[in-house]
Image: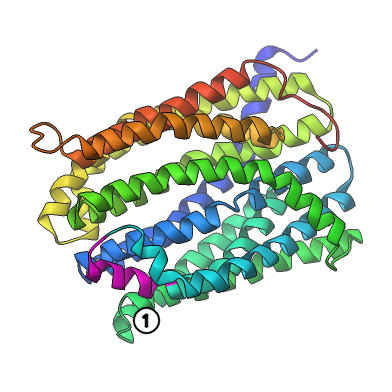
């Protein structure tokens, strides 16, 4: 019988094998946003604020469909654990077709209603015009973005996180080159930033889909749309959509609150949320490993290994959160210089980032447990947990924005981020830890 230390070492190696490439790939994803923020930020504060609002809309539309990656990872991994490679790839192809369908249904109304969508944030006319310009073009990238989600989910379920890394790096480099060329070389301004990102997203989607198609052909899995399979994939994703909707609603509350405070605040919030997203994706690498490993072990019926590796991943998540928190605190005073020349934005940004740094260890645990439960297919609990989080967080965010008139303490935007850390991340931690301590989420078999 293997020793406890041997099992622990094996678990660590398994986590690192999947998490390290996932970490590098996920870090490159927010670089799309960081590159846009750095390039557009030097056009002016109005353009940067417009990017923040438009980015929030696009990220919400795409984020609601994150089940295309997460749900596909879990379902494909379960079938891999059960020894059904052909069935796993067939499910993956169904997920890609579902992504194309949802993307088309989102792109048309999104493009037509771009002006009205950004108008909901109540910002100034100048900021709204910049946001609408960016958003109309950015919606053209929704289909490729969703295909990237689905294809990445397939590969993660197959225990392959290296291929998404290679494609993500190439796509990000292409995005930076295209943005600089179109914004400054051609002189398209904020529209050039949107167009450059869309072109890079198309290239990334084509590359990842080609890898999945080759694997499906090799295993004899069908490539044509299978309506029953697509419906099953959509039905399985409903709970994750609800979960994601509640989380995205909380993030939209943050953007709405910042917009209500003024252009300086919304520009600062855009930069802070971009940095937070960068770190969140870094922490999410262990969660990606959790989805793939949990699904595979439960598919194989190995409850002991599932529990062991979950414990190890929680510890990895906490340690990662401590490291990113310390790094963010150290970098906070100088990060503003990379993105803007506005002294008011710089002064506010470092205080917001210090606040965000405090909650990084909590975020590390939250992301890991979220990945474990997604990998287990425990979407219904995550959906109800998201509702609880939203109910706790919204009143705190409202208090931070509305009850600070004449306030002589910390800036209202700093208080909004405190509300985010306590009400959003803190309540998520409580909900997820409560579930993970039990065993009702540990359902075995090739399908939940």
Snapshot quadrant of residue 33: bottom left
Mark 1 packing: few (<14 Cα in 10 Å), some, or many (20+)?
Answer: some
Q: Position of residue 248 (x, y in %)?
A: 48, 46
- Span colored in magenta: 123-135
Snapshot quadrant of residue 196: bottom left
For the residue pair 90 and 138, the one nearer the viewer reads as: 138
Q: Is residue 354 visible?
A: no
Q: Residue at x 16, y 39 (%)?
A: 411
Q: Please count the marks in the image.
A: 1
For the residue pair 116 and 285, the one nearer the viewer reads as: 116
Dot 1 corresponds to which residue?
Answer: 182
Magenta-highlighted stretch: main secondary structure? helix
From the viewer's perspective, is residue 347 above or below residue 107?
above
Task: Tell me if 56 is positioned left or right of 386 in this view.
Answer: left
Q: Is residue 277 visible?
A: yes
Q: Residue at x 85, y 68 (%)?
A: 224
Q: Is residue 344 magenta?
A: no
Q: Residue at x 19, y 39 (%)?
A: 412
Q: Quadrant of the C terminus?
A: top right
The colour scheme used here is rainbow
Q: Position of residue 341 (x, y in %)?
A: 15, 62
- Residue placed farthest to the bottom in the image? 186
Secondary-structure class at tag 1: helix
For the residue pair 381 and 66, the one nearer the viewer reads as: 381
Q: Position of residue 324 (x, y in %)?
A: 37, 36
Task: Tell me if 117 is positioned left or right of 190 in this view.
Answer: right
Task: Tell me if 242 is positioned left or right of 209 in this view.
Answer: left
Q: Quadrant of the N terminus?
A: top right
Q: Position of residue 266 (x, y in %)?
A: 25, 54
For the residue pair 288 and 149, the one nearer the viewer reads as: 149
């Amino acid at each position: 019988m293997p020793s406890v230390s041997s099992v622990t070492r094996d678990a660590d190696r398994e986590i690192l094998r999947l998490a390290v490439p996932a970490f590098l790939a996920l870090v490159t994803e927010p670089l799309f946003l960081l590159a846009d923020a750095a390039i557009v930020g030097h056009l002016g504060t109005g353009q940067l604020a417009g990017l923040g609002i438009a980015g929030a809309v696009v990220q919400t539309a795409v984020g609601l469909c994150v089940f295309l990656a997460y749900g596909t990872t879990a379902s494909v991994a379960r079938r891999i654990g059960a020894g059904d490679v052909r069935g796993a790839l067939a499910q993956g192809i169904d997920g890609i077709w579902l992504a194309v369908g949802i993307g088309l249904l989102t792109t048309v109304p999104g493009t037509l209603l771009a002006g009205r969508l950004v108008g909901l944030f109540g910002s100034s006319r100048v900021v709204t015009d910049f946001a609408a310009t960016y958003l109309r073009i950015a919606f053209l990238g929704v289909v490729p973005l969703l295909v990237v989600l689905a294809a990445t989910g397939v590969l993660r379920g197959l225990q392959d996180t290296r291929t998404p890394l290679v494609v993500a790096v190439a796509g990000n480099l292409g995005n930076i080159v295209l943005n600089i060329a179109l914004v400054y070389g051609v002189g398209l301004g904020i529209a050039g930033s949107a167009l450059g990102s869309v072109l890079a997203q198309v290239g990334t989607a084509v590359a990842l889909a080609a890898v999945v198609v080759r694997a499906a052909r090799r295993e004899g899995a069908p490539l044509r749309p299978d309506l029953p399979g697509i419906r099953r994939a959509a039905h399985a994703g409903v709970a994750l959509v609800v979960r994601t909707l509640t989380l995205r609603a909380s993030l939209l509350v943050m953007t709405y609150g910042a917009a209500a405070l003024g252009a300086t605040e919304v520009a600062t919030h855009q930069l802070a949320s971009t940095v937070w997203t960068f770190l969140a994706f870094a922490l999410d690498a262990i969660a990606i490993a959790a989805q793939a490993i949990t699904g595979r072990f439960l598919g194989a019926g190995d409850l002991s290994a599932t529990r062991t590796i979950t414990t190890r991943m929680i510890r990895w998540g906490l340690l990662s959160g401590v490291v990113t928190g310390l790094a963010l605190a150290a970098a906070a005073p100088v990060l503003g210089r990379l993105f803007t020349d506005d002294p008011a934005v710089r002064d506010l940004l470092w205080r917001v980032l210090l606040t965000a740094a405090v909650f990084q260890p909590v975020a590390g645990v939250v992301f890991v447990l979220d990945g474990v439960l997604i990998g287990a297919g425990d979407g219904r609990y995550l959906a109800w947990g998201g509702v609880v989080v939203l109910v706790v967080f919204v009143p705190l965010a409202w208090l931070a924005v509305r009850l600070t008139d004449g306030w002589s303490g910390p800036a209202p935007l700093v208080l909004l981020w405190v509300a985010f850390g306590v009400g959003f991340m803190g309540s998520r931690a409580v909900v997820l830890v409560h579930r993970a301590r039990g065993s009702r989420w540990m359902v075995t078999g090739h399908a939940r």
